[in-house]
Image (cartoon, rainbow, N blue to C red):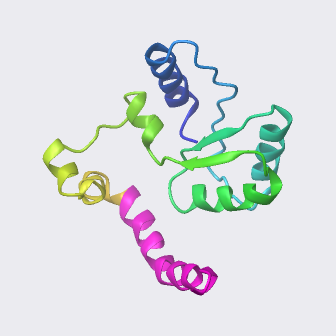
Amino acid sequence: GSTEVALRDAKAHLEAEVPGLDLAWCHAPSGVFDPQGDEAGKILENLNSKGIRLCFLALGAPKQERLAHRGRSAAPLVGFASIGAGLDFLGGHQTRAPLWVRKIAMEWLWRALSSPGRMVPRYAKCFAILPGQIWQALRNRPKL
């Protein structure tokens, strides 16, 4: 996820913090990335062929969750962790909310107000699918 520059900077930060860390592959998908499209299929094939076992998805919601869901069957040996803007934060390309905002669990609102043109539509899409996701999760729970 993110951009090539942000990924390069996040990689440098992680390698400095964790000596011996083996980052097998960093990839910034196109700006029109579709988790159900051909580009996503090629990414999942690449993860398989490289023997990668953990993939951090920094695509933003809900793209990263959709790709992780697709990856459960297309790349079953790969674990997926949806980290949103985590790599942008590590690489210094985005700024975290102040600590007091994070402590009251309102970083999402701080980010939306800091970049409304980008974040409000994204959050609105996530909120729009939430009821259906909750319903599906409840239906999938084993009955006790």
* 88 horizontally vs 15: left or right: left
What percent of the width, then of the height, locates residue 79?
Answer: 67, 46
Q: Position of residue 123 (x, y in %)?
A: 40, 66
**Residue 29 among those drawn in magenta:** no
Q: Tell me the residue at 53%/86% (across/down).
A: 135
54 with respect to 125 (left or right): right
Range shown magenta: 118-144
Residue that sits furthest to the front in the current view = 144
Above or below, 144 against 55 in this view is below
Q: Main secondary structure of the magenta part?
A: helix
Q: Nearer the viewer, residue 121 or 1?
A: 1
The image quarter containing residue 68 is bottom right
Q: Left or right: where does residue 56 sit relative to residue 124? A: right
**Which corner quadrant holds the C terminus?**
bottom right
Q: Is residue 82 above or below residue 2?
A: below
Image position of 8 with respect to 31: above or below: above
The residue located at (46%, 13%) in the rendering is 16
Of residues 102 and 140, the one nearer the viewer is 140
